[in-house]
Amino acid sequence: MGRILAIANQKGGVGKTTTAVNLAASLAVAEQRTLLIDADPQGNATSGCGISRDDFAANTYDVLLGEASIDEALVRGVQFRHLDVLPTTPDLAAVEVELVDADDRVTRMRQALAAVRDRYDFILIDCPPSLGLITLNMLVAADALLIPLQCEYYALEGLSQLMETVQRVQESLNPALALDAVLLTMFDPRLNLSKQVAADARAHFGDLVLTTVVPRNIRLAEAPSFGKPIVVYDVASVGAQAYMAVARELIERAAHPTPPRNTVAADLPVEGAP
């Protein structure tokens, strides 16, 4: 069955959606059957793949409410033969209120994915930059977590809350959920700060940190405005090469899995601490 990775970080602007879109496209280029789920009401993963509102009748909102199946909501063959996308619209934000009294409110996505996960090698979920009901749904559905971590000041601070949420999910709803990988983003080799953050992340997370780092790259920033993943917009750019290397690492890790590691939240730096 396909490996379900929730791409999450409660901080915005860390390269989460950029990672979701470009990693999904890079996996598809490598002929991995890939499903990208846009679970962020901002819908940036949807538009970043070049999908417009006219391209779909149902979306993540309808799937979570049980008004459509994933099969009915999928946009197939997006940019590449092996890439399918479950799109979203800003309506998704209403799910937080509409499901609040439902007994199965945190397992809706897991139930929905059960029907399709064996068709894919990888299922990537672009989570919203918050730790509300939508993100909880995605963590319950996921096999593992992939955390984009920007190489900037206070990068590790603030992750404690995310890891505490992960621990609660493990304890009560999804014991198999693991921290699968940490991806360093926005890396600038000219800056000592970037190098220091990378060193700190590797010291804390060890081999969970992917070898590949994603550099700051203007082509990566431009690609979403054209509705194209970076491997379509400029395959020769350093950003495209980085995400293709990340895809290769994940494929290799999936082929040779290591025992999962659950990072303890208390081990992380506390926001505001010296």
Image (spheres, grey):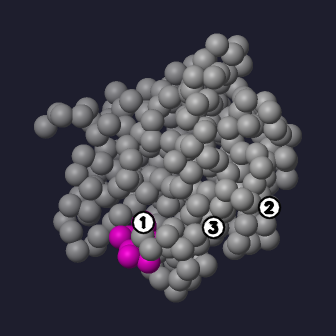
Q: Nearer the viewer, mark 2 or mark 1?
A: 2
Task: Point out the stretch of residues depicted in magenta.
Answer: 213-220
Q: Secondary structure at mark 2?
A: loop
Estimate the spatial distance between the alpha carbons at disc 1 and disc 3, rounded to whole Å.
Answer: 25 Å
User: For numbered disc 3, what is the local secondary structure?
Assistant: loop
Q: Examine the rendered structure and indicate whether residue 236 appears above or below residue 211.
A: below
Tell me if mark 1 has few (under 14), some (14-19) or many (20+) residues whose alpha carbon lies within 10 angstroms of its own: many
Question: Of the residues shown, which amino acid type is indicated by label 2?
Answer: Arg
- State which mark lies toward you, 3 or 2: 3
Read off the residue under disc 3: 50
The structure residue drawn at horizontal position 42% and vertical position 66%, both measured from the top left corner, is 213
The residue under the point 68% across, 38% down is 61
Disc 1: which residue: 213
Can residue 32 be seen in the rendering of this structure? no
Give the mark nearest the N terminus, 1 or 3.
Answer: 3
Q: Which residue matches tag 2?
A: 76
Q: Residues within 10 Å of mark 2 (few under 14, many from 20)?
A: some
Residues at marks 1 and 3 touching, judged by CB atoms closer than 8 Å: no
Q: Amino acid at mark 1?
A: Val
Residue sitting nearer the eye, 213 or 222:
222
Who comes first in sequence, dot 3 or dot 2?
3
Residue beneath the point at 37% across and 43% down? 11
Residue 40 appears at what percent x and percent y?
Answer: 55, 44
Q: Position of residue 173 (x, y in %)?
A: 64, 22
Label annotation for residue 87:
none
x and y, in percent, of residue 13 in the image: 37, 53
